[in-house]
Each structure stands twice: as structure tokens, then as C-alpha cells.
């Protein structure tokens, strides 16, 4: 089965994850896909294909006899899709992109003016949505490419390769993909997530990340008699937000620049809550950003009264560069595998995180590789057919390196 056929099959499963369900995995359909993948892996001939109680899928492609003494290499992708856009009833199709605007089945238009990356693929076949759902290339393209790689190696026993440890995780999109990962049972100390964007991307630098929740306690009285008494929690919370650096938001930053991002606000005169995230590639700057929030709350408590501003903050993940730097051959090997496939490697910082970021601190060094896809988490998500075939070639090159 081709990698394209596999991908189109996998996106028919609605595996949208949920931040509010409180279950593991967060949605039952992730396990449905996982069970389906176990059957496929088993039928292909991988060893020990299984799904655990948390919905994680594991399997092993044994090494060829001449490579039995080499360290296994892990390949990891995630099964869930973002809840930002519907992942149900995806109607994917293949369109030949001739340049200019591309009109999808719903009438929605993908324009290179909005998505300049389209200009890279004039004359190529693109897998697209109908404009009403996401596509699911993030990260079912990674799942399909990993399985297609294993299928190719099994069909070509003349190719020597190390053991490949395969894992497919749930709930990556809600930041929980590594929560229950079986590090010891996985069996590899070095791995790659196949969860990146356009073909050629290699990522081993990601944000340091923290989440924060501010609770503002006001004091409400009847507005007719409120003078010098009322403390409006909405206005107090707004003052906090207004004191965040205005040029340090996602909309104003790029590359290695960090930011503060207010992602939720709720409240009334009595109580208001502000949820925000803090991101920076540089660990010292990351710590300074968190300290700024603490100091800002201390200042506002001095203005409004002690205990009015209560900040809770928790680190989410750290920059994997601190760990991957110990084994930079993971990066040079990936670059060599790409060049061997005729793909020019592009080393870029991740303005986000991956399962691999957390796994790198759990004992599995784990940079991220491209899937070939673009415009993730939106109705204009797409992936070039050629890029998927090239990624299989890259992965084959990677695991056959001596």
C-alpha cells in the first residue's frame, strides 16, 4: 500500500483530542485508530505490536542480522489532531496545483498571497481538504510515513538496517503526548518524531514553555454607592494585561523571539481569570519572563491590596537543544539522509513543542523531522504527494545508515 493510500485511510478516523475530558486518551477514537494501527503493524510483520491502556501504540521492526549490534532507532508520531478546527468527516482530495488561487470543494480559496509556501509546489499534486475541516497531516502524515518506511524495509530484505522502534502517541496536541510514554519498554535511547512541517525541516530547538493562570479578586458593591469601595476585577485584570510588553506577543515575534500570549479571559466584577502562556528559546530569558509576571503581580497587589492578584504558574516543557547537543550526530545523520534523498535540509527552531522535547528530558533524545505538510490546524492544511514519498525515502536512508 502506498504512503498516500495509508494517509488517506488514517485521516478518515476522527481523532480530535480534548483538553477538557479528563480521560486518557482524551477521546475514545484515538484508541480506535490505535487498535487499527496495531493490526496493520502486526500484518506487516513487525514484532510485539501492541496498544496499552493509555492508547499508546508500540512495535518493533527487528534489525537485519548484520546490524544486530547497532543501537535501535525510534520513530514516533502522534495520532490525535488539533481541536482548533473540526477533524470529523474529512473529505480529502488530490489536486494538481497550477499556480495562483486554488479553490476547494466548499468554495474556500487557498491563495499564495496568504500562503506563500504554495509557490514551492507549482505543478505538483497536493492533498487538500474541502475547506470545512483540517486535513490531519499533523500528524497522520507522520504515522503513514513511518509505517510505509517499515513496509518498504520488510519488502527489501537486502537493505541492512538497525532495529526500528515505532511508537504512536495520543494527545500530543493538548501537551500530554509524553505523559504515559513507556520509556523503558520503548527500547530506544535515540529517536525522531516525524511531526514537522515542510519537506526538509529538521528541528532540535524548541521553546521553553510555561502556562500561567491569574485569578483576580475584586470587591463588588452596587454601582450607585461604589465610589472608593468597588474594585472591579475585570478592570483590574485588564490592567495586568495592559502592562504586558505589547511587542512581545505571537503576532509580533518570530524566529528565536519569545512572547507572552493571553489565551483566555473570563470574569465579572467579583472575580476574573486570565490564562496565558510564556515562551522563549533561551532558558535565562524564559526564567526572566516568568519572574516578570511574578513581579507584575506583586506590584499590582501593592496597588490594589495584598492577595487581590493570585498567580499560578507551571513549566510545561524545556528546549530539547540542551539535551540533543550531547549527541549532534542525530542532526548530522538526518541532514545526510535528506541530502541522499535529494532534499535540502532546513534546520529551524520550533516555535512550539513536540513530544520529542519532553522525551529528550525523559531519556530518549528526540529531534523532530518534517512530514512535508503545511498550514496545520486549519481548513487550508495541505501536503504535497511528492513530499510524502520523499519523507519515506529520507526515513529509509536514516535507518539504513551504518
Image: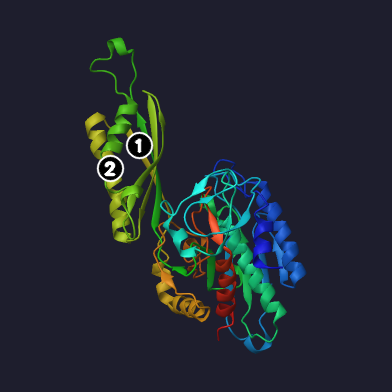
Which numbered disc, 2 or 1, marks the residue closer to the eye?
Answer: 2
- Of 128 and 236, nearer the camera is 128
Residue 353 on image: x %, y % = 45, 58
Identify the residue under disc 2: 244
Residue 137 on image: x %, y % = 57, 57
Residue 213 on image: x %, y % = 40, 40
Spatial CA distance of label 2 from label 1 is 16 Å
Quadrant that contains the N terminus: bottom right
Which disc number belongs to residue 204? none
Q: Would you identify the image quadrant in which residue 37 lies? A: bottom right
Sequence-first tag of 2 and 1:
2
* SS type, badge 1: strand
Q: Is residue 27 above or below residue 50?
A: above
Dot 2 surroundings within 10 Å: few (below 14), some, or many (20 or more)? Answer: some
- Badge 2 vs badge 1, beta-carbon distance below 8 Å: no
Q: Give the residue displayed 50% in from the left and 58% down from the top.
A: 374
* SS type, badge 2: loop
Identify the residue under disc 1: 310
Residue 77 on image: x %, y % = 58, 62
Quadrant that contains the C terminus: bottom right
Amino acid at each position: 500500500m502506498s504512503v498516500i493510500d495509508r494517509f488517506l485511510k488514517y485521516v478518515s478516523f476522527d481523532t480530535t483530542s480534548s483538553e477538557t475530558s479528563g480521560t486518557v486518551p482524551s477521546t475514545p477514537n484515538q484508541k480506535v485508530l490505535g487498535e487499527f494501527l496495531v493490526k496493520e503493524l502486526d500484518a506487516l510483520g513487525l514484532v510485539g505490536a501492541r496498544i496499552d491502556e493509555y492508547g499508546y501504540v508500540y512495535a518493533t521492526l527487528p534489525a537485519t542480522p548484520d546490524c544486530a549490534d547497532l543501537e535501535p532507532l525510534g520513530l514516533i508520531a502522534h495520532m490525535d489532531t488539533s481541536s482548533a478546527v473540526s477533524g470529523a468527516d474529512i473529505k480529502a482530495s488530490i489536486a494538481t496545483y497550477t499556480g495562483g488561487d486554488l479553490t476547494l470543494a466548499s468554495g474556500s480559496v487557498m491563495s499564495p498571497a496568504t500562503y506563500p509556501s504554495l509557490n514551492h509546489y507549482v505543478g505538483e499534486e497536493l492533498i487538500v481538504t474541502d475547506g470545512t475541516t483540517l486535513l490531519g497531516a499533523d500528524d497522520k502524515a507522520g504515522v503513514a510515513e513511518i509505517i510505509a518506511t517499515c513496509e518498504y524495509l520488510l519488502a527489501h530484505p537486502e537493505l541492512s538496517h538497525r532495529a526500528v522502534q515505532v511508537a504512536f502517541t495520543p494527545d500530543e496536541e493538548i501537551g500530554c503526548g509524553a505523559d504515559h510514554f513507556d520509556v523503558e519498554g520503548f527500547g530506544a535511547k535515540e529517536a525522531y518524531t516525524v511531526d514537522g512541517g515542510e519537506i526538509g525541516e529538521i528541528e532540535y530547538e524548541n521553546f521553553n514553555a510555561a502556562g500561567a493562570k491569574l485569578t483576580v479578586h475584586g470587591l463588588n458593591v452596587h454601582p450607585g454607592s461604589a465610589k472608593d469601595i468597588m474594585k472591579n476585577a475585570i478592570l483590574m485584570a485588564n490592567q495586568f494585561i495592559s502592562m504586558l510588553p505589547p511587542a512581545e506577543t505571537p503576532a509580533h515575534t518570530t524566529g528565536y523571539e519569545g512572547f507572552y500570549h493571553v489565551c483566555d479571559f473570563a470574569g465579572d466584577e467579583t472575580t476574573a481569570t486570565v490564562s496565558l502562556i510564556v515562551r522563549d528559546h533561551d532558558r535565562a530569558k524564559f526564567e526572566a519572563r516568568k519572574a516578570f509576571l511574578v513581579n507584575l503581580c506583586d506590584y499590582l497587589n501593592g496597588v490594589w491590596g495584598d492577595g487581590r492578584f493570585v498567580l499560578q504558574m507551571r513549566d510545561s516543557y524545556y528546549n530539547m537543544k540542551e539535551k540533543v547537543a550531547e549527541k549532534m550526530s542525530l542532526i548530522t545523520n538526518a541532514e545526510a539522509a535528506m541530502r541522499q534523498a535529494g532534499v535540502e535540509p532546513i534546520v529551524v527552531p520550533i516555535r512550539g513543542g513536540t513530544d520529542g522535547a519532553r522525551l529528550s528530558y525523559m531519556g530518549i533524545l528526540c529531534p523532530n523531522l518534517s512530514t512535508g505538510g503545511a498550514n496545520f490546524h486549519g481548513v487550508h492544511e495541505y501536503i504535497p504527494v511528492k513530499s510524502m514519498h520523499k519523507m519515506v525515502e529520507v526515513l529509509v536512508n536514516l535507518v539504513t545508515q551504518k
